[in-house]
């Protein structure tokens, strides 16, 4: 009489432990790893892949984030870090994924990578406002109603908890990423330049991290509003906040989907550009500077920004890379404002060694 009850209790405890494990995560990588690992333990599929959906130059692509296959859990390098037009798979031509995006429900198709009776089950992953932001692929020979409900339920938990993480990572006024998320982001980016296919945490059995080879680099820019103090003094903090909010909207419209945008504090913003050449990075920042200069801010009128940017190296710590960009920013402030300056270029020219930009000049 007690056997069914004991079996039910064991199953219930296992599910509760899985939920605790997922909701105990504090960053996206860990959350994604935990989701895929948990689902594999519960349903035992041949392969499970979590993808994100992104748009690059008008084309939608599906990019793998975490994969469990052949008893190995792999944290793929975030493929917004790969060379854009080579990253992932074009959604066009991937009929199952395209149908899943259109219908917003699970799609079943023949497995592309395994002979026999293996099927591919593609689930939509929803983000804020119930927009499809990715997919979960489950390759299995057996995927009945119970497994379907388990996957759907855990994807809902993932969506809800992702929303909580997202809220905690955003600046209240502008909606951009906040200061406390910056260190984690820049540390991860720097680590991709140091790590090849290695154990992610240095312990046997830990998830692997897959590094994509490329020739491009990340760039970090510090953006500061020129004479912002005078805006607050002349028009009041209410209009000052409106300038900050409108500037954030211009950033979202001007920068690319995979550029990470932060409000660093006060009138200072930070952008971590997706991998690009020096010329491309400078062109993107110049485009933003000109966009701000041409924009009419209600009541305030014209506002300009100064920008300092630098290359992200593998041995950089957050304070170092921000410090380099700040030095370039101070040079821009000291030499007329409303311009974009490169730390590496200024070093090469020798000008950073001969001046101190935190002197008498009013920087902010």
Image (spheres, rainbow, N blue to C red):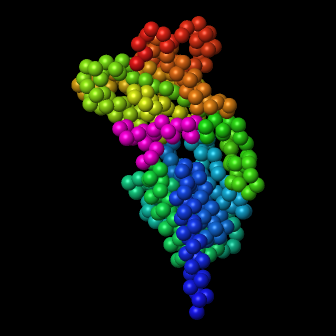
Q: Is residue 246 magenta?
A: no
Please indicate, yes or no, whether residue 360 appears anywhere in the rendered image: yes
Q: Is residue 180 magenta?
A: yes
Q: Which residue occupies the foreground of this view, 172 or 215?
A: 172
Residue 302 position by quadrant: top left
Q: Position of residue 294 (x, y in %)?
A: 34, 23
- Residue drawn at the location 58% of the way across and 76% of the way down: 11
Residue 20 position by quadrant: bottom right
- Residue drawn at the location 41% of the way across and 33% of the way down: 251
Please indicate, yes or no, whether residue 94 appears anywhere in the rendered image: no
Farthest residue, direction bottom: 1
- Residue drawn at the location 74% of the way across and 57% of the way down: 205
Farthest residue, direction right: 204
Q: Position of residue 137 (x, y in %)?
A: 58, 62
Q: Position of residue 316 (x, y in %)?
A: 64, 30
Which residues fall within the magenta stretch?
Answer: 167-186
Q: Position of residue 89 (x, y in %)?
A: 58, 51
Image quarter hosting the N terminus? bottom right
Image quarter hosting the C terminus? top left
Depicted 41 relative to depicted 234: above or below: below
Count every numbered label the image shows and give the total.
Answer: 0
Q: Which residue occupies the foreground of this view, 332 or 5?
A: 5
- Left or right: where 4 falls relative to 225: right
Farthest residue, direction front: 2
- Left or right: where 288 falls relative to 47: left
- Residue drawn at the location 42% of the way across and 48% of the way down: 167
């Amino acid at each position: 009489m007690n056997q069914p009850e004991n079996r039910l209790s064991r199953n219930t405890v296992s599910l509760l432990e899985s939920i605790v494990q997922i909701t105990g995560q504090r960053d996206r990588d860990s959350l994604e790893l935990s989701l895929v690992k948990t689902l594999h333990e519960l349903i035992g599929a041949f392969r499970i892949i979590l993808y994100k959906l992104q748009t690059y130059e008008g084309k939608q692509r599906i990019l793998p984030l975490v994969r469990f296959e052949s008893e190995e859990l792999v944290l793929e390098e975030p493929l917004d870090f790969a060379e854009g037009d080579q990253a992932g798979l074009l959604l066009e031509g991937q009929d199952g994924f395209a149908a899943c995006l259109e219908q917003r429900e699970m799609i079943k198709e023949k497995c592309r990578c395994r002979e026999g009776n293996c099927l591919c089950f593609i689930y939509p992953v929803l983000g804020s406002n119930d927009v499809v932001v990715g997919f979960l692929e489950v390759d299995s020979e057996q995927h009945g109603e119970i497994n379907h409900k388990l996957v759907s339920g855990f994807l809902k938990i993932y969506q809800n908890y992702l929303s909580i993480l997202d809220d905690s990572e955003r600046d209240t006024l502008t909606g951009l990423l906040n200061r406390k998320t910056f260190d984690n982001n820049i540390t991860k980016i720097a680590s991709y330049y140091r790590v090849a296919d290695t154990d992610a945490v240095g312990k046997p059995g830990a998830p692997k991290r897959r590094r994509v080879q490329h020739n491009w680099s990340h760039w970090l820019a510090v953006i500061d509003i020129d004479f912002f103090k005078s805006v607050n003094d002349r028009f009041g903090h209410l209009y000052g906040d409106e300038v900050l909010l409108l500037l954030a909207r211009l950033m979202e419209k001007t920068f690319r989907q995979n550029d990470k945008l932060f409000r660093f504090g006060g009138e200072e913003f930070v952008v971590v550009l997706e991998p690009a050449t020096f010329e491309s990075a400078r062109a993107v920042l110049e485009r933003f500077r000109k966009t701000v200069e041409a924009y009419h801010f209600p009541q305030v009128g014209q506002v300009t920004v100064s920008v300092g940017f630098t290359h992200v190296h593998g041995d950089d710590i957050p304070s170092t890379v921000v410090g380099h960009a700040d030095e370039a920013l101070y040079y821009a402030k000291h030499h007329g404002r409303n311009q974009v300056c490169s730390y590496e270029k200024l070093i090469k020219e020798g000008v950073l060694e001969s001046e101190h930009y935190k002197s008498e000049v009013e920087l902010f």
